[in-house]
Image: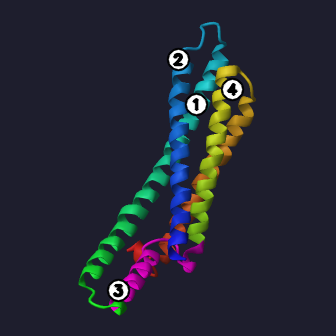
């Protein structure tokens, strides 16, 4: 059960990271395309496209920063530290009961150093929400690419969608920080 829960969280975070990297590559292509717009393109349209691309790029960086740091924390601070302790415990174990105890301790540490505990449901929900917002961002980024390349789409809708994702992300990060601040004494992984 512990491994399944950890795998689900890791899968969600890593898949969001992969999608955001792809969106970042698209934003680089988009920047090049904006620089190559024909001279006869209206100045107002070019300015609007550049503003949308800037907003999308900044939001993408914020989302990537969050997911990459969360993934790094889970891997290097939670899993690897617990794994190291498991390896040392296994090396020192001399009986099957000790092996079971070491494994049980390992599972407990995985839970105590990650937001997988039942008491951390709010933090986990926020993380799930940020992952969902990352996917929404990638869809909006693709719509922006189509708008610039093919002039298909409504810039106002794209702007509103980007603002909605940005506002949602900032709201969720603030909620996560407030939650972690309230619960920092209660959980090992927050010390």
Q: Mark 3 points at which residue?
A: 99
Q: How far apart are marks 2 and 1 (CA)?
A: 12 Å
Magenta run includes residue 25: no
Disc 4 is placed on an element classified as: helix
Residue range in magenta is 98-121
**Viewer-closest of 31 and 176:** 31
Say few, some or many: other residues with alpha carbon within 10 Å of mark 1 (under 14 / 14 to 19 / 20 or more).
many
Q: Mark 1 points at which residue?
A: 53
Q: Name the residue under label 2.
A: 35
Question: Residue 46, how many percent across, how many down?
Answer: 62, 19
- In this image, 28 relative to 131: left or right? left
Q: Mark 4 vs mark 3: which is more N-terminal?
A: 3
Dots 4, 3 in contact, CB < 8 A: no
Name the residue located 50 percent from the left edge and 41 percent from the top edge: 21
Q: Nearer the viewer, mark 4 or mark 3?
A: 3
**Viewer-closest of 164 and 23:** 23
- In this image, 121 relative to 62: left or right? right
Q: Mark 1 vs mark 3: which is more N-terminal?
A: 1
Q: Mark 2 vs mark 3: which is more N-terminal?
A: 2
Residue 96 location, quadrant: bottom left
Q: Distance between the residues labelled 4 and 2?
A: 15 Å
Q: Which of marks 1 and 3 is in front?
A: 3
Question: Residue 53, how many percent across, how many down?
Answer: 58, 31
Q: Which of marks 2 and 3 is in front?
A: 3
Q: Mark 2 vs mark 1: which is more N-terminal?
A: 2
Residue 161 location, quadrant: top right
Q: How many labels, in total?
A: 4
**Can see residue 171?**
no
Q: Is the magenta stretch mostly helix, strand or loop?
A: helix
Say few, some or many: other residues with alpha carbon within 10 Å of mark 2 (under 14 / 14 to 19 / 20 or more).
few
Quadrant holding the N terminus: bottom right
């Amino acid at each position: 059960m512990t491994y399944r829960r950890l795998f689900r969280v890791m899968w969600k975070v890593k898949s969001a990271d992969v999608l955001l990297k792809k969106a970042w590559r698209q934003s680089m292509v988009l920047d090049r395309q904006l620089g190559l717009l024909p001279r006869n393109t209206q100045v107002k349209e070019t300015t609007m496209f550049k503003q949308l691309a800037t907003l999308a790029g900044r939001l993408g960086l914020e989302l990537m920063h969050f997911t990459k740091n969360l993934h790094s924390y889970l891997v290097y601070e939670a899993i690897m530290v617990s794994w190291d302790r498991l390896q040392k415990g296994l090396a020192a174990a001399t009986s099957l009961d000790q092996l079971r105890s070491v494994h049980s301790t390992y599972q407990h540490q995985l839970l105590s150093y990650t937001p997988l505990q039942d008491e951390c449901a709010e933090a986990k929900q926020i993380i799930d929400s940020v992952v969902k917002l990352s996917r929404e961002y990638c869809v909006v980024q693709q719509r922006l690419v189509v708008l610039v390349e093919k002039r298909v789409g409504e810039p106002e809708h794209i702007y509103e969608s980007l603002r909605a994702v940005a506002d949602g992300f900032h709201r969720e990060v603030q909620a996560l920080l407030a939650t972690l601040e309230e619960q920092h004494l209660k959980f090992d992984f927050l010390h």
